[in-house]
């Protein structure tokens, strides 16, 4: 027996019975797969990528099999789904017998509503994607107008801005379906603007400010931060110097952002909140890492409140983002500005501009930040800014201007709106339905 064992060992080493000495590595089975997202909305002609994660991550498999249960509505090719026509379809990914699904709903193409103004012509306008001309909001050729925000409630279109009276004072103005409503006595020596509009049920909120007695001989002209609820003025800051820039209303909950001033005269980012439709409200100020700081835009997502704006130290201006009680996030340490913010699909979108230096000097560059990461929206060496952002069905729409020409960006691609021949126009507000 001892002699036989020694021979067997030698045979193994020489490889004559190799199959009896070495086994193939065991195959690692796929235990499960997950798909992201599990639900998706697309417009006809648009595409999106679906991601599949296999567990464990070292599992052995040959590939992923993709199917659509309604190829007349949605097709799929290696995880890229393309919307064909209105309806819904279920996309299934299968790996080694394990499956996961994503429901894709194809919705009608979005309609883009835009507002803004032509500073050279002194004209506010409204424009809808697909139209070839803008609607002038001024009914009097001698009346200058500006528009800053647009929103829809059902089929009703609301625009906030200002219009001049016969003495040249800017009067806070709200347009509903093109019909103007002045929100203050146009005969009084006040300047003011509606910066934002939000509709909740039957209540229309217009946030802005007015300058108390511009014609007074005293050097100090107080600005009052206000909200007009169904045309009735609500003063947010009492006798303090303040302005309101954005309002979000849902049910009886109302959020307004802007700034107030410290006893030393420094601007402080401020949030006003109400749970009873502004019958009562709370005022909250935010510390900033700048001498002056302003909250220009806001959005509410679930229980989270986001505000954007900028901090100004006198020599530099930095775009900033606030979320709830978290420390302020500096979006850019250079000369930059943030105007608007929205949250969609778990991502935070902010727009504004960043100043860059070229061989011929400085130039503002329209910028989109996604989760804090900056993306320049143009490489044209003309001043450009992004003013408002709206996300729908996975598409990102941004309004603004390049070199005084009105521009709408869709997923980073710029398209100009033809409006007159002015070089001083801006698309300030955008709403996608």
Image (tube, rainbow, N blue to C red):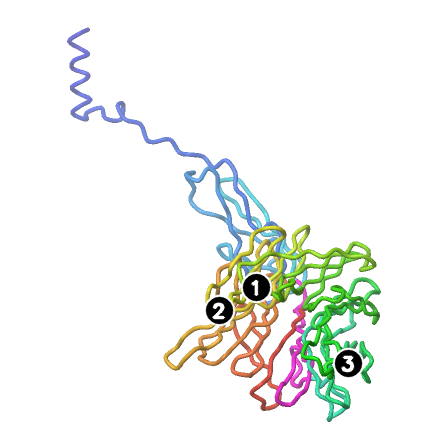
Label 1 vs label 2: CA separation?
A: 20 Å
Residue beneath disc 3: 178
Q: Is residue 136 above or below residue 129?
A: below
At label 1, counting other C-alpha atoms closer than 10 Å, the crowd grade (few under 14, some 14-19, many 20 or more) is many
Question: Which residue carries the number 2 mark?
Answer: 316
Q: In the image, is 330 to the left or to the right of 221?
A: left
Which residue has dot 1 on it?
Answer: 350
Instruction: Looking at the picture, tell me which residue is in the foreground, 158 or 68.
Output: 158
Marks 2 and 3: which is nearer the front?
2
- Closest to the camera, between mark 1 and mark 2, is 2
x, y (%) of residue 252? 80, 57
Q: Left or right: where does residue 359 sit relative to residue 156?
A: left
- Give the image location of residue 206, x and y in percent: 76, 69
Label 2, label 3: how many angstroms apart (C-alpha)? 40 Å
In the rendered image, the residue lying farthest to the top is: 1
> Taking 150 as reference, is 62 left or right?
left
Residue at coordinates 56% horizontally, 70% vertically from top-left? 410
* Disc 3/disc 1 C-alpha distance (Å): 29 Å
Q: Nearer the viewer, residue 157 or 186?
A: 186
* Whether residue 43 is visible: no
Question: Which region shows up in magenta?
Answer: 107-134
Disc 2 residue crowd, few under 14, some 14–19, many 20+, Cα 10 Å:
few
- For marks 3 and 1, the one nearer the N-term is 3
Upstream in sequence: badge 1 or badge 2: 2
Indicate which disc, 2 or 3, sits on the residue closer to the N terminus: 3
- The picture quadrant where one finds residue 143 is bottom right
Q: Position of residue 196 (x, y in %)?
A: 71, 70
Secondary structure under tag 1 reads strand
The part of the image, by quadrant, that contains residue 159 is: bottom right
Circle number at residue 96: none
Which quarter of the figure is the N terminus placed in? Answer: top left
In the image, residue 358 sits, relative to residue 280, either above or below, namely below
């Amino acid at each position: 027996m001892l002699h036989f064992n020694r021979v067997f060992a030698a045979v193994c080493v020489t490889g004559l019975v190799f199959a009896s000495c070495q086994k193939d590595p065991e195959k690692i089975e796929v235990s499960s797969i997950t798909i992201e997202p599990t639900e998706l909305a697309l417009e006809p002609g648009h595409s999106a990528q679906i991601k599949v994660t296999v567990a464990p991550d070292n599992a052995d498999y040959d590939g992923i099999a993709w199917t659509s249960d309604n190829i007349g509505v949605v097709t799929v090719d290696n995880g890229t789904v393309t919307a064909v026509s209105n309806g819904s379809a279920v996309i299934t990914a299968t790996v080694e017998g394990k499956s996961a699904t994503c429901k894709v709903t194809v919705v009608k193409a979005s309609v883009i509503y835009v507002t803004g103004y032509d500073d050279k012509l002194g004209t506010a306008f409204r424009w809808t994607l697909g139209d070839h001309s803008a609607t002038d909001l001024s009914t009097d050729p001698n009346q200058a107008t500006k528009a800053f925000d647009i929103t829809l409630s059902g089929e009703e279109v609301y625009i906030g801005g200002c219009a001049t009276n016969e003495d040249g004072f800017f009067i806070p103005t709200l347009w509903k379906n093109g019909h103007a409503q002045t929100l203050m006595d146009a005969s009084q020596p006040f300047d003011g603007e509606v910066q934002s509009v939000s509709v909740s049920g039957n209540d229309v909120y217009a946030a802005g400010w007015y300058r108390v007695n511009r014609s007074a001989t005293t050097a100090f002209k107080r600005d009052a931060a206000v909200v007009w609820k169904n045309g009735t003025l609500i003063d947010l800051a009492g006798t303090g110097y303040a302005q309101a820039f954005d309002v979000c209303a849902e049910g009886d909950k109302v959020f307004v952002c802007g700034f107030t001033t410290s006893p030393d005269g420094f601007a402080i980012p401020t949030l006003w909140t109400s749970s009873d439709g502004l019958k009562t409200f709370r005022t909250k100020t935010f510390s900033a890492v700048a001498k002056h700081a302003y909250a220009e835009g806001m959005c509410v997502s679930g229980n989270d409140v986001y505000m954007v704006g900028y901090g100004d130290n006198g020599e530099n201006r930095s775009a900033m983002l606030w979320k709830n009680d978290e420390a302020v996030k500096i979006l850019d340490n250079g000369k930059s500005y943030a105007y608007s913010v929205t949250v969609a699909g778990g991502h935070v979108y902010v727009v504004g501009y960043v100043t860059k230096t070229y061989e011929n000097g400085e130039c503002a560059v329209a910028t989109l930040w996604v989760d804090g990461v900056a993306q320049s929206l143009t490489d044209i060496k003309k001043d450009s800014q992004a003013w408002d952002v709206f996300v729908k069905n996975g598409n990102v729409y941004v309004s603004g201007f390049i070199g005084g020409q009105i521009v709408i960006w869709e997923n980073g691609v710029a398209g100009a709106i033809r409006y007159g021949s002015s070089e001083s126009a801006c698309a300030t507000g955008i709403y996608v339905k």
